[in-house]
Image: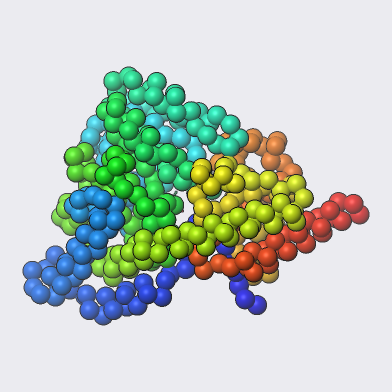
Amino acid sequence: MKKIYLDSAASTVIDERVIEAMIQSMKEDFGNPSAIHSFGQESKSKIETVRKNIAQWLHVNSNEIIFTSCGTESNNLIIRSCVENLHIRRIITSPLEHKSVLETVRDLKEKHLELEIVFLPILNKQGDLDFSHLENLLQDNIPTLVSLMHSNNEIGNLTDIEYIAKLCKKYNALFHSDTVQTMAHYPLDFSKIPVDFASCSAHKFHGPKGIGIAFIRKSTGLKGIMTGGAQERNMRAGTENVHSIVGLGKSFDMAMKELNERRKTIEELKRYTIDQLLKKIKGVSFNGHGTDFSKSIYTLLSILLPFPNTMVGFQLDMKGVAVSQGSACASGASKPSKTMLQLYGEDELKNTTTLRISFSHYNTIEEIDVLINILSEIQENKVSTILS
Ligand code: PLP
């Protein structure tokens, strides 16, 4: 059975060229980058080449690129250091953020009782946020960090980060954007989008797991939070993961060079999936702004099936198709995700199933056909079970 992978928002298959670059680096770059001998300096120079290259893609200074272990670490570093070192007294964020932001904010609130946390209200079932409320809040003269993700990882909604960044600038607030789902999928030019901080993770664009970036604008004066080493310009202590940095660099470079081509393929797949679902799955609907390509990330489609079935993800997996079921299974009971509950409420979700289908340029129309046929079979079985 040929397996079909439609869960690239969770993690992507590693590009063969990235694997080759990493193997070569593992063989060659074993010297500690902090050592002054030639072995160390060779490793150091590989890291600096990647840093410079990524900085060029993002139109920033290379000393504003800090290598971390992942998106979660980057979000932690930025948000925690803003409170602990830049004396931020208020964080404005949204209830739809990734848990690496939400749980960090919650933890900071427990440790710093004076810290104010504001969640922007959700305006509608599509998950739009109330940005006029954000502007009202920013008019108070409180040292503030705004943290809003570029694309939501469950429903795919895009935030206009250029607009938010400019709004934050106008009111002297700092702006962090979790760009884990969008970096290397969109051409982000941070010389035009005045974000102060952004996070990125290589395994979302065919790079290795365990390596990420924190973009930290120099002018913010942010400091590292880990002790024990001066690596990464004092921003992130610990011996650098050289071969993973090389892998990150290669995958970033490939993603940016092939961006238009990959995007065209993936957009066609997403359009086809929407079209086929509407034709073959009765009562299907789309979460967030899924069908609006200007408001939703092209790599992801979250759907709401009009029947309750905690086993859909499992049934698909049994047939070799991997998607993400938008539910967290605790003690055998399947519950809708927090994001879905924020959008719809428990009652409305009672007789539904959420699936997140996420694409890469390696997927094909034939694979989408297999997915839709299985979903259609599942729906028919479900109908006959109800009738019998
Ligand atoms: N932020 C978003 C929006 C994500 O989708 C993810 C991963 O799914 C993360 C942060 C965490 O990234 P990592 O897996 O590199 O820790």
Instruction: Give the residue at x 60% y 46%.
Output: 291
Instruction: Check the image and name the residue furthest to the left.
Output: 36
Image quadrant in which you'd find residue 349: top right
The x and y percentages for residue 372 are 70, 61
Instruction: Give the residue at x 84% y 53%.
Output: 383
The x and y percentages for residue 202 are 37, 60
Q: In the rendered view of the protein, which quadrant contains the C terminus? A: bottom right
When the figure is inspected, residue 16 is found, relative to residue 331, above or below; the finding is below
Whether residue 168 sits left or right of residue 366 in the image: it is left
Q: Nearer the viewer, residue 116 or 206?
A: 206
Whether residue 150 is visible to the viewer of this picture, yes or no, is yes
Q: Nearer the viewer, residue 338 or 12?
A: 12
The x and y percentages for residue 36 are 8, 69
Instruction: Check the image and name the residue furthest to the right.
Output: 388
The x and y percentages for residue 117 are 39, 29
Q: Nearer the viewer, residue 308 or 57?
A: 57
Q: Nearer the viewer, residue 50 or 298?
A: 298
Instruction: Give the residue at x 64% y 69%.
Output: 366
Instruction: Give the residue at x 36% y 38%.
Output: 162
Whether residue 264 sits left or right of residue 254 in the image: it is right
Image quadrant in which you'd find residue 107: top left
